[in-house]
Image: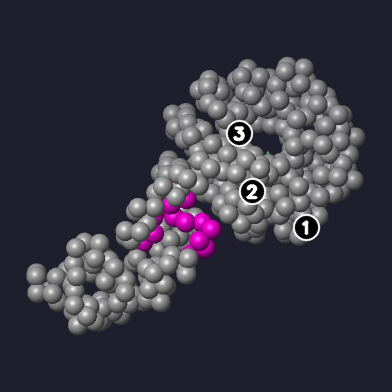
Amino acid sequence: RLNKSRCKTWVSVFYNENKNTDKRKIKVFDTTLRDGEQTPGISLTVDQKIKIAEQLDELGVNYIEAGFPSSSEAEKSAVEKIAKLDLDASVCGLARTKKNDIDACIDSNVDLIHTFISTSDIQLKHTIKKDKEEVKEIVSEKIEYIKEHDVSCLFSAMDATRTEKSFLKNLFSLAEEAGADIINIPDTVGVMTPERMKKLVSDIRKDLDITIDVHCHNDFGLAVANTISAIEAGADQVQVTINGIGERAGNACLQETVMSLESLLNLETNIKTEKLYEISKLVERLTGIKLLPNSPIVGENAFSHESGIHAHGVISNSETFEPGIMTPEMVGHKRRLVAGKHMGKHSVKEMLKDSGLDPSEEELKEITKRIKELANKGKKITEVDLYTIAEVVMGSA
Ligand code: KIV
Ligand code: ZN
């Protein structure tokens, strides 16, 4: 590993402690423990959920959607326990627009109830079997019921992005009149594009004064891009999950969304970005869902360099082949030079320097040649291989 990256931990501390308060602030609503847990094959224990909730709180998310209390006794108990943890984040419970679901959230003592109902024609017909007038009535009635209990309310129009626009806008206005604190626009089956998302959110923004939240699924791999577009169009809050886990292809990934908002759009969140790598690893371990090495921000290769040209550039200035506006230190990760068939003399020298070896120019050429020969035979080169070859060539083995 490069020494330079080791001594720059202060950069992330400085970066996170000196966030410019004049920037527009975006709230982060994390649903790892609810939509994330709906990933096929995942089932977290109560203790695991608590562990993740505590770490999400340390990360600085504004909301933790802890679960769906009416779905089972175990789920209700997990939500209750998380609500009792006295976290800085507000704890949210999910409820259909049904009295029983809402009562289960109220009993769990959550700070915020996230109530939702289907609104697209296809879901009205095939899932809830209700017409639009009935939906309007239910929405007003159930939001008023939540507010009578003095709990904050987030209303989601499920499948909003496939819902007839005039009906959707009408429903959100009714939700606002009934006292909803936040309205959410879910792209439930991930069919938006950034351009369409921008148009939809700016249309809705014109009519509403309350907080607008978006919840984008990743069926076409566009969840983060659509979320970012929604923010550019005036949304205030993003629903995300650690590592992008969630139903089917998942949700917008927290680490990608936050770093794009902060580093690319120059907006501010409450996230302590240097904790992103650690929480990503925790969620990987507890859910068993592994990230690909090339995953952005926290993947093992996110700041790794093997090719000679790239490594050479990065050794003299990391911005040559990294974004610069996002460094490994900012996200709690490390820059690595990797041994392999694409490596050049400069990275061999730098890697050996880290372990106190200082080959001559001739030795360096020979070590690099032998590594490439080995790699060309299909062998994956490890650091141990590199040091062994170096010691043989330098006559110290
Ligand atoms: O994807 C979705 O529509 C949801 C709702 C519950 C908001 O997860
Ligand atoms: Zn969802």
**Considering the numbered disc 2 on the image, is that residue within a helix, a strand or a loop?**
loop
Q: Residue at x 74, y 26 (%)?
A: 98
Q: Which residue is mark 3?
A: 63
For label 2, count other residues whose C-alpha is less than 10 Å away and answer few (under 14), some (14-19) or many (20+): many
Mark 1 to mark 2: distance in Å?
22 Å
Under circle 3, the secondary element is strand
As shown in the figure, which amino acid type bears the numbered disc 3?
A: Tyr
**Label 1 neighbourhood size at 10 Å, few (<14), some (14-19), many (20+)?**
some
SS at mark 1 in the image: helix
The dot on residue 38 is none
In primary-sequence order, the first of circles 1 and 2 is: 1
Q: Image height check: is 195 above or below 274?
A: below
From the image, give the main secondary structure of the stretch colored magenta.
Answer: loop
Question: In the rendered structure, which amino acid carries the disc numbered 2?
Answer: Leu
* Quadrant in the rendering for residue 361: bottom left
From the image, tell me which residue sits under label 2: 267
- Using the image, tell me which numbered label, if any, was put on residue 196: 1
Q: Going 53% across and 58% down the picture, which residue do you hit?
A: 325
